Amino acid sequence: MENFELQTPTRIYFGRGRENEAGAIAKAHGARKPLICYGGGSVKRSGLLERVKASLAEAGLDFAELGGVQANPTAEFSAYTARFARENGCDMLLAVGGGSVIDSAKMAAYCVHTDFEPWDVTMKRAVPTERVPVGVILTIAATGSEMSDSAVLTNGKLKRGFNSDLNRPVFAIMNPELTFTLPPFQTACGVVDILMHTMERYMCTNTDNDLVDKLAEGELRAVIAAGRRAMAEPEDYEARATLMLAGSLSHNGLMGAGRACGLWAHKLEHEMSGLDDRIAHGAGLAVVWPAYLQFFANRGAGRERLFRYAVNVWGVEPDYTHPERTIQGGIDACRAYFDSLGMPSRLGDLGLTEADIPVMAASATDNGRISYPAIIPMGLEESVEIYRLCL
Ligand code: NZQ
Ligand code: ZN
């Protein structure tokens, strides 16, 4: 096990009806005037926004509201949110939505009381030391942003993440019922993203972290089953609850504890949804991941890990005489599962073409200057090869 640090300060308020406590919870975390941040309108259609406002009013809190965060949020809107919060005297950003709303709020939070711009913070040109607190009411189980130390913004065609423990929200209200209204496509994108946050960390170079390996395998099996159930029956509370809790645990740092790993398939995906912000993050990941593993399998790298992954996560029958068959079985089973969720499987399904590959690979590796320490070091050439396996 590698040395590590882990801080997960976000207080979770989990379960049915908890959003009706939003006022009391925000107040307990020091808010006097929260700014309710939300996306394109799903929280209005579901009636959630009205319930949140009623709860804030009941707790005697003044508040302001700002909708309009787009999926794959822009640095520009995040900057506007910071100005809006400052002009309205808000002392907390209350993100009601998914990863996009949360990330937009997280990065705005650095800029309410400073002259920083969210994009400068993202690119590490401005170094924040404090921020306005961020609270969350989660409406989609997916990114884990409600507990994570990261936030991702897009500026033009560039999508980049910023990691800091300051990013972690102070609280997250998580009622699985709020996810009943998700379109099947978004449910599926969420399932893929949850799996990916654990699978990527599992696909590490050290193979001696038995506790975290087994936590990961158990979590992955539970998410695979819950994903099937939630797709078949959107109002299956237990399945939705499993996905919601797993989303947080997948990306709060626990699954990376003691591992040497990175989220390089994520990096390759961010180039895709950066190039075209209509691409949903989970859908892009569904295309990249099988190709990412195929790349290692083709090179005969990471064989023990890939073998264990196939058997312990996807239930492939181990073939010790022909381990490559077992490995391939794991990759194929994952691809088949993503297909069963209705996810895309090729770059073309996302509207991307072969011509986009050199652009994305160059951007991911800063024109070949960066190489990532994955099972095989991943540079420009490797990134191109993986993207080509996505064709
Ligand atoms: O905008 P509205 O109208 O609310 O609709 C949203 C949006 O269209 C809709 N939706 C959300 N909850 C709903 C709902 N529709 C009906 N009922 C509900 N209960 O779903 C659509 C997608 O929402 P979004 O917030 O974009 O999804 P997600 O949570 O997957 O967030 C994706 C963003 O987070 C980033 C991604 O790259 C992407 O930009 N990520 C953030 C991470 C982090 N901060 O830790 C880690 C991830 O790896 C990821 O990169
Ligand atoms: Zn992700």
Image (cartoon, rainbow, N blue to C red):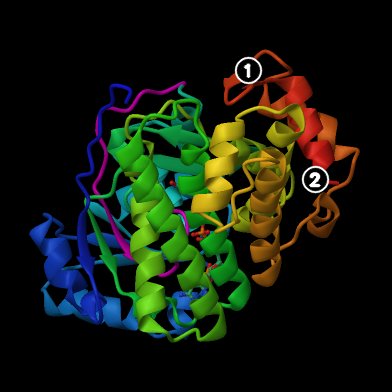
Q: Say if the magenta span includes residue 171.
A: no
Rendered location of residue 179, percent (x, y): 43, 76
In percent of width and height, residue 188 lies at 58, 68
The prevailing secondary structure element of the residues shown in magenta is: loop
Who comes first in sequence, dot 2 or dot 1?
A: 1
**Residue at the image point whose x is 61% and y is 53% from the top:** 281
- Between 343 and 114, the one nearer to me in the picture: 343
Image quadrant where residue 63 sits: bottom left
Q: Taking 90 as reference, is 379 left or right?
A: right
Bounds of the magenta span?
A: 125-145
For residue 371, which numbered disc appears in the image? 1
Q: Position of residue 359 (x, y in %)?
A: 80, 31
State if disc 1 and disc 2 touch (CB < 8 Å). Answer: no
Q: Secondary structure at mark 2?
A: loop
| Residue under pointer 2 | 390
Residue 345 appears anywhere in the view = yes
What's the amino acid at mark 1? Ser
Please identify the quadrant where the N terminus is shown.
Answer: top left
State the CA–CA distance, disc 2 to disc 1: 20 Å
Q: Residue furthest front?
A: 321
Q: Residue at x 44, y 49 (%)?
A: 103
Residue 81 located left or right of residue 359: left
Q: Nearer the viewer, residue 38 or 313?
A: 313
Amino acid residing under circle 2: Cys
- Density class for disc 2 (Cα within 10 Å; few <14, some 14-19, many ≥20) is many
Q: Residue at x 86, y 54 (%)?
A: 348
Secondary structure, mark 1, is loop
Q: Is residue 73 visible?
A: no
Q: Residue at x 32, y 34 (%)?
A: 257
